[in-house]
């Protein structure tokens, strides 16, 4: 892409009579998306790597490879900074150690299994830690309480009053609470393999490694089916004909 845009620029600078040069001049004037994108990437490279495109082109033929490497490096840096600054991605940041392809992408599990794991990893679900973000009292942690660990309306009212205290420590229905601690799913956890249970309580970043993807997906399916029964109605079996 850089090579192509540089060729167009040279045609423009040399006042070529070619029709392409005139098209390039017009698109540059209009600052179309492709031109703005190339210009932006070159600016980022210059600022981050002190990369001089014209000088590097004259110096050696491997400049394209160098540009690609620098862009990849820059993308990783921006990706890492942005994800850590995003409060919604708290769970994702706790399990994502580096920029790389995840084992789930090559595990061979079905679409639905993959979807369940991705939804949990990226907090794209309906647990209270997420739905509480969009309620009127979203600044109050009571909007994100686990309803299975706050068992009655009176308890909830008490929690609202306790939330005014400086050392209030509520039980939030977040990803780790649900898969590790919530008593509503204790029987499901007890049936997990010993190996997965060990990782479940030891290091959350290992939960989605290649050897545990399928079992973890099945566990999440059962957890969310119990948590949201209205979204998983029992299947009706056709009556046998007499």
Image (cartoon, rainbow, N blue to C red):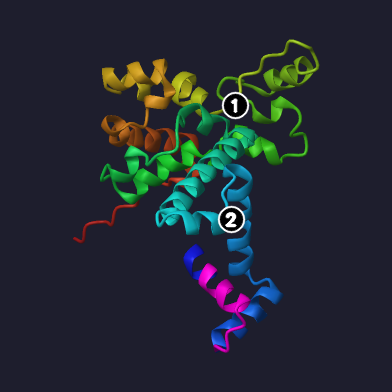
Q: Which mark is residue 202?
A: none
Q: Position of residue 91 (x, y in %)?
A: 53, 30
Reply above or below: 233 against 140: below
Question: Which quadrant, please, contains the C terminus?
Answer: bottom left
User: Which quadrant of the view contains residue 165?
Assistant: top right
> Spatial distance from mark 1 to mark 2, Cα to Cα?
48 Å
CA neighbours of label 1 inside 10 A, class few (<14), some (14 to 19), many (20+): some
Q: Is residue 46 found left or right of 73 in the rendered image?
A: right
Instruction: Please check the rendered image and state whether residue 207 is part of the magenta-colored stretch, yes or no.
Output: no
CA neighbours of label 2 inside 10 A, class few (<14), some (14 to 19), many (20+): some
> Predominant secondary structure in magenta?
helix
Q: Is residue 194 found left or right of 16 in the rendered image?
A: left
Q: Is residue 141 visible?
A: yes
Q: Position of residue 78 (x, y in %)?
A: 58, 42
- Answer with mark 1 or mark 2, whichever residue precedes in sequence: 2
Q: Which residues are magenta?
A: 6-18
Query: Measuring 53% from the left and 31% from the top, which residue is drawn there?
Result: 93
Reply above or below: 141 against 117: above
Q: Is residue 1 visible?
A: no
Q: Position of residue 54 (x, y in %)?
A: 55, 59
Of marks 1 and 2, the one in the foreground: 2
Residue at the spot of label 1: 147
Residue at the spot of label 2: 41
Q: Is residue 93 found left or right of 199 in the rendered image?
A: right
Query: Measuring 31% from the left and 35% from the top, which residue is drawn there?
Result: 213
Q: Going by the picture, which residue comes out furthest to the left?
A: 242
Q: SS class of the residue under badge 1?
A: loop
Reply above or below: 20 against 137: below
Q: Position of residue 79 (x, y in %)?
A: 55, 41
Query: Measuring 40% from the left and 34% from the top, which residue is drawn there?
Result: 220
Q: SS class of the residue under badge 2?
A: helix
Query: Measuring 61% from the left and 68% from the top, which residue is drawn there?
Result: 35
């Amino acid at each position: 892409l850089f090579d192509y845009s540089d060729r167009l620029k040279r045609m423009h600078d040399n006042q070529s009579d070619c029709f392409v040069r005139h098209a390039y001049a017009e698109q540059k004037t209009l600052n179309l998306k492709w031109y703005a994108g190339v210009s932006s990437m070159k600016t980022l490279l210059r600022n981050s790597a002190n990369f001089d495109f014209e000088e590097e082109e004259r110096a050696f033929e491997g400049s394209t490879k160098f540009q690609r490497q620098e862009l990849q490096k820059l993308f990783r840096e921006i990706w890492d900074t942005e994800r850590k600054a995003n409060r919604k991605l708290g769970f994702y940041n706790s399990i994502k150690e580096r920029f790389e392809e995840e084992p789930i992408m090559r595990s061979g599990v079905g679409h639905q299994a993959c979807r369940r794991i991705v939804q949990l990893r990226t907090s794209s679900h309906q647990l209270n830690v997420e739905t509480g973000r969009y309620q009127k009292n979203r600044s109050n942690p009571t909007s994100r309480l686990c309803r299975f660990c706050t068992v009655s309306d009176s308890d909830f009212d008490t929690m609202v009053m306790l939330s005014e205290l400086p050392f209030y420590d509520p039980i939030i229905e977040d990803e780790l609470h649900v898969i590790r601690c919530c008593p509503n799913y204790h029987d499901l956890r007890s049936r997990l393999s010993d190996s997965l249970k060990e990782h479940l309580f030891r290091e959350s970043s290992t939960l989605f490694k290649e050897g545990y993807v399928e079992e973890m997906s099945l566990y999440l399916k059962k957890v969310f089916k119990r948590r949201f029964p209205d979204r998983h109605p029992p299947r009706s079996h056709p009556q046998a004909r007499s």
